[in-house]
Amino acid sequence: MTDSQPTVAFIGAGNMAGSIFGGLVANGYNAQRIIASDPKPDALAKLQASLNIRTTTDNREALAAADIVVLAVKPQVMKAVCCDLAPHLKPGTLVISIAAGISAASLHTWLGGNQDLALVRCMPNTPSLVQAGASGLFATPSVSDKQKQQAESIMAAVGSVCWVNNEEDIHAVTAVSGSGPAYFFLMIEAMTDAGVAQGLNKDTAARLALDTAYGAAKLAVNSDVDVVELRRRVTSPNGTTAEAIASFENNNYRVIVANAMQACADRSRQLAEQLAD
Ligand SMILES: NC(=O)C1=CN([C@@H]2O[C@H](COP(=O)(O)OP(=O)(O)OC[C@H]3O[C@@H](n4cnc5c(N)ncnc54)[C@H](O)[C@@H]3O)[C@@H](O)[C@H]2O)C=CC1
Ligand SMILES: O=C(O)[C@@H]1CCC=N1
């Protein structure tokens, strides 16, 4: 622990919050400076036992102890949670929302409408749990440089961080990295099924598909050439890979991906509209 570590309260301790605070603890963040608030006492008891973080079922109690509050509930319950917390928000508290869709304007209104409210929108992803996350952040004008650094250092402890200057870009961040892990999990699932269809047993197909995804990502991350060149190096002229890539291209793989990501961003915008006041 360092004494300079701020106390961070997570309102909602589900999959995404758990990935962030799990990653923080694994990275050496003082567990006693993390408070998870959630209405599910059983889940909290498990978190306390496994991570030694502080827990509560009372959002206001978590807020009272926090320098930074991370709003990590589902978009559909965000308004109720914010309206309940608004009268208890201390001046100077940094608020980080990780909710998909919900705009800074809605959050600002629900949190009491104070002009000085320091609000950051963050779109993280679940590989944060293994410090391999990728987050996009957007700061509203009242966030100080110090608070930007605080938000960045929390998310940087669990992965890479990109700031966007335009809030609208958070929809695209959601389409690329927020939801992105699921696209790769689907690919691994599909490759496993196809391997089984070609005669491999399930365990072998799953192991090969998973390790290939891991190896490809690790190679790309550590390489000094781009993914186009890495793909070229696998693809021998008239060889096996060329046939597979041609099949992908002929079946509009890039269009399939682009359409899926457009649907994702559209849903993010739709949530923002449906759930706004
Ligand atoms: N799961 C993911 O990969 C990502 C999720 N997000 C965002 O994170 C937020 C949470 O999503 P998940 O963790 O997936 O959902 P989740 O359902 O796993 O977690 C939400 C948690 O909030 C708790 N909760 C419900 N009402 C509450 C209340 N009144 N006060 C405090 N806690 C309450 C629930 O018991 C649950 O544990 C969402 O807004 C989502 O858009 C953002 C990026 C990625
Ligand atoms: O599916 C969702 O709505 C959330 C936001 C990004 C990833 N999961």
Image: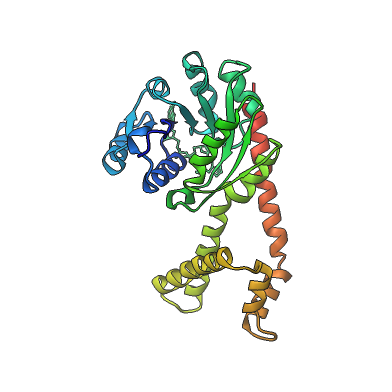
Res. 98 visible in picture:
no
Q: Is residue 33 above or below residue 277?
A: below
Q: Is residue 49 above or below residue 255?
A: above
- Which residue is located at x 57 percent, y 15 percent? 112
x, y percent for residue 56:
33, 27
Q: Residue furthest bottom?
A: 238
Q: Quadrant of the C terminus?
A: top right
- Which residue is located at x 55 percent, y 68 percent? 219
How many marks the image carries: the answer is 0
Q: Judge left or right: residue 13 versus residue 276.
A: left
Q: Residue furthest front?
A: 3
Q: Quadrant of the N terminus?
A: top left
| Residue 237 found in image quarter | bottom right
Q: Nearer the viewer, residue 271 or 118?
A: 118
Res. 90 visible in picture:
yes
Q: Judge left or right: residue 93 versus residue 230.
A: left
x, y percent for residue 192:
49, 69
| Residue 244 found in image quarter | bottom right
x, y percent for residue 44:
32, 35
Q: Is residue 97 above or below residue 79?
A: below
x, y percent for residue 255:
72, 59
